[in-house]
Each structure stands twice: as structure tokens, then as C-alpha cells.
Image (cartoon, grey):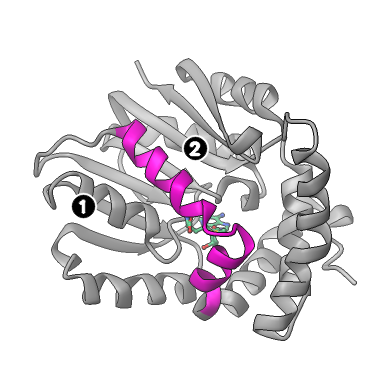
Amino acid sequence: TSYGFRDVPEGEKQPLVNEVFHKVAKRYDIMNDVMSAGLHRVWKDAMVAALNPRKSSDYRVLDVAGGTGDIAFRIVEASGRQAHATVLDINGSMLGVGAERAEKKGLTDNLTFVEANAEDLPFEDNSFDAYTIAFGIRNVPRIDVALKEAHRVLKRGGRLLVLEFSEVHMPLLDSFYEQWSFKAIPQFGKMITGDAEPYQYLVESIRKFPNQEDFAAMIRDAGFSRVTYTNYTGGIAALHSGWKI
Ligand code: SAM
């Protein structure tokens, strides 16, 4: 069975997404390690290295769909605990786990948690030096709207970075990846959380997401300049970059 996302109209997708992440929130971090065989850590480190945050207390980052805080924590650490990161997510359960982790890491002074929708950001124009979103944009029903919002809240000279699953361009890896994602991941999900359905959704949403070139075009359409991308692990994930100039 699946959540039937294939046929769900755009307007009804968000409640289903919210149910998935509400269900998995407590086990989200361990599932990430299992499902990606630890690779998500490597990709996230590479994303933050690409961002190269300024070591300054007036450097402000917005991490959208920030969930349990993985990207924001890395950015704050990479800035020598100088930068400020706002972790925004539509799901209070995910943010709750993130806030607990932040406390344990002693990072609360550098972080703000905000429950809101990527399609309608509660910030003024030209507010942030960087906008990051990791494995989040494919869950947002209207991606074009979210990208326009990203452009609006960034300062001039601000940077957009999007990490997302993408199209695999490597012989053998692609067939291995198909087997892994369509068979193994929902099974692992069932073993760990007792429920395969949320992971079925995750896999389906990856398949439906635009490939590297098409997504780069969407970023340009939202007004960004100098749009580029880098494939990670043969394109299993890709990092897209754009600038507001
Ligand atoms: N960025 C984190 C990471 O890389 O570990 C979490 C990624 S998790 C796969 C996707 C997140 O997107 C979930 O926490 C979910 O609640 C959030 N999300 C889904 N739709 C959203 C929306 N419209 N606005 C903001 N966040 C959303």
C-alpha cells in the first residue's frame, strides 16, 4: 500500500506530508542513518562546506524544512558558534526533537525555531544572508512558490542552497539504487517504526522530483542568478546553488 501520493491533488498533499513526519519525528535521525547508510552526513557536511558561513555574529541563515536541526547545527558549528540560524519547519513534532537536541549541544543561543510554511515565510524582505533547505523542497506542494519566497527573504548578495535527492547518472549504481530505495527502505522503515507507508511516500516523492537540469531551471525562474549544481554520490543527491543579485 501507499499513501497514494501519485494521485493526490496539490491542495491535499500537505496534510499527508505532515502526518508522515509527525509519525517518524522521534525516529527520524536514526532512520536517516539507516536509509542512507550514513551518507546523508557526508552530503550535509559537503553542503555546509559549500556555504562556508561567515564567522560573524551578524551572519543570519534561514534553514527551511529544518526538521531536527541537522543543517542548522552544522552551520553554527562551522561559523565557530558565531552565526545565527533560524530553523523553520511546518511540523512541530520535528522541531520539538530539534529543540531538545539543540539544548543538549548547548547551541540554543545561536538558534531560533519557527513553525511555519515554506510557501509563506513569516519574515520581511531582504532578511537573510543564506537560505538552506535539505531534503525538504520535494515535500513542499508548490515548489515554485517556496523558491519565490526564498528569493524574497534573502538579502542582495544572499545565497540559496538546496540539497535534494536527484537523478542517478551512473551505470550499476542506478539499478542498485532502485532496488535499495524501492525494496529495502520501506522494509527498514517497517522494521524500525512498524510502518512501511511513510517510507513508501518518501521513495515515491524522490521519484517524482525534477531532475538536476529541470530543477535548476525552476530556480532561475524564481529570479536567482548564477545557478549551478553539484552531484553527490553519482547523483543520488545534488546540491543546487543560486544567488540573489
Ligand atoms: N532538513 C532536515 C534534514 O535534512 O534532516 C529535515 C528533512 S525532512 C526529510 C523534511 C522536512 O520538511 C520535515 O521536517 C517536514 O515537516 C518539512 N516540511 C514539509 N513540508 C513543509 C513546508 N511546506 N514548509 C516547511 N517545512 C515543510
Q: In the rendered view, would you say 177 is above or below 125?
A: below
The reply to whether residue 125 is visible in this rendering is no
Q: In which quarter of the image is the C terminus?
A: top left
Residue 162 got which mark?
Answer: 2
Which of labels 1 and 2 is toward the front? 1
- The amino acid type of the residue labelled 2 equals Val
Q: Say if 174 sits above or below 214 in the image.
A: below
Residue 5 in the magenta stretch? The answer is no
Per the image, is 47 magenta?
Answer: yes
Residue 194 image position (x, y, % from top left):
72, 86
Residue 80 pos. (x, y %): 13, 48
Compared with 188, 203 (above or below) is: above
In the image, taking residue 112 as reference, residue 35 lies left or right, namely right
- Tell me the kind of residue under disc 1: Glu
The residue sitting at 27% across, 37% down in the picture is 128
Q: Residues within 10 Å of mark 2 (few under 14, many from 20)?
A: many
Q: Residue at x 71, y 30 (%)?
A: 211
Q: Where residue 197 sits in the image (x, y, percent)?
A: 78, 73
Compared with 22, 83 (above or below) is above
Does the residue tagged 1 have its C-beta within 8 Å of any atom of ligand 1?
no
